[in-house]
Amino acid sequence: MLAEGVGTAVGLAALGVSARWNWWRPHACGMPILMYHKVGTPPEGSRLKKLWVSNDEFRWQMGYLKRHNYAPVTMRHVAESINGGPPLPARAVALTFDDGYQNNLENAFPILNEFGFLATIYIVVNAVGRDNFWHDPATETRLPMLSWDEAISLAKAGWDIGSHTLNHSRLTRLLLADVEKELADSRQILGEKIGALPVSFAHPYGDGADNGDIRRLIQKAGYRTACSVHRGLADVATATFCLKRIFVRGDDTRWDFHLNLTRGQSRL
Ligand SMILES: [Zn+2]
């Protein structure tokens, strides 16, 4: 009886684990593009804790990439490789940061420097030197964003500066003329301020990544890649303007991180 009870308990535990983690999924093809938002300790009052990865976990994750011989590249490298430039290294991975938080410079940048890794940061142009004005203050406290000088210092260090629109807009809710402005004006302003026109774009909320009209405007504006928030490993050659990403959540375990990189997603 006892053995049977233990057997049932083990069986149920195995089922529970399999319903939460994708360990049974085969290894997937494609390039991991990791999506981060905020690195550090969430301030009191932050309800969006899954968007925060602690410094310690972030350092562990970079160590994982190093130990497993991943080669971080920027999304500009990805664009160049697609457009006849040098091919991407084996085990290429891209580290991307959405929105342009100052904590990316303060916390993530020094850790990446320890490893010699570069990243791509998608900036909300009208938030530079200001705060995350698009968030509901009831769910996320006001956080400082990069200043232009800080964004320039990241670019000088080799980071790729991409656009995340002017206003963190949901593009499908705008008239196409306004979408065009969000795409083209943000690119032009970033080009003037940073000194190099961006080639990388990320959709706020992933919104509009599947919309053909918006995709055409992204290409027309001069971007060479666009990231969605669809989960999985990216097929950079054929889905260049709707790239899947791996959302690295603050409540992920280290096993999640491993499954994300090898299976494209850890959760069902
Ligand atoms: Zn965003």
Image (tube, rainbow, N blue to C red):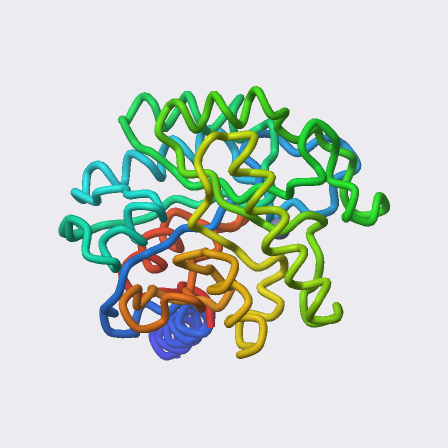
Residue 104, image x, y percentages = 53, 31
Q: Nearer the viewer, residue 19 or 81?
A: 81
The residue at the far right in this view is: 138
Tell me if 196 is positioned left or right of 133 in this view. Answer: left
Image mark count:
0
Tell me if 145 is positioned left or right of 226 in this view. Answer: right
Q: Quadrant of residue 128?
A: top right
Give me the residue at 59% from left, 53% from top.
184
Residue 103, image x, y percentages = 58, 28
Residue 250 visible in the current orientation: no
Give me the residue at 74% from left, 46% from top.
47
Residue 114, image x, y percentages = 31, 21
Q: Is residue 1 above or below residue 79?
A: below
Q: Nearer the viewer, residue 26 or 122?
A: 122
Residue 237 visible in the current orientation: yes
Q: Is residue 4 above or below residue 42?
A: below
Q: Quadrant of residue 225?
A: bottom left
Q: Nearer the viewer, residue 100 or 215?
A: 215
Q: Quadrant of residue 244?
A: bottom left
Give me the residue at 77% from left, 48% from top.
134
Give me the residue at 30% from left, 73% from top.
238
Position of the N terminus, as image quadrant, is bottom left
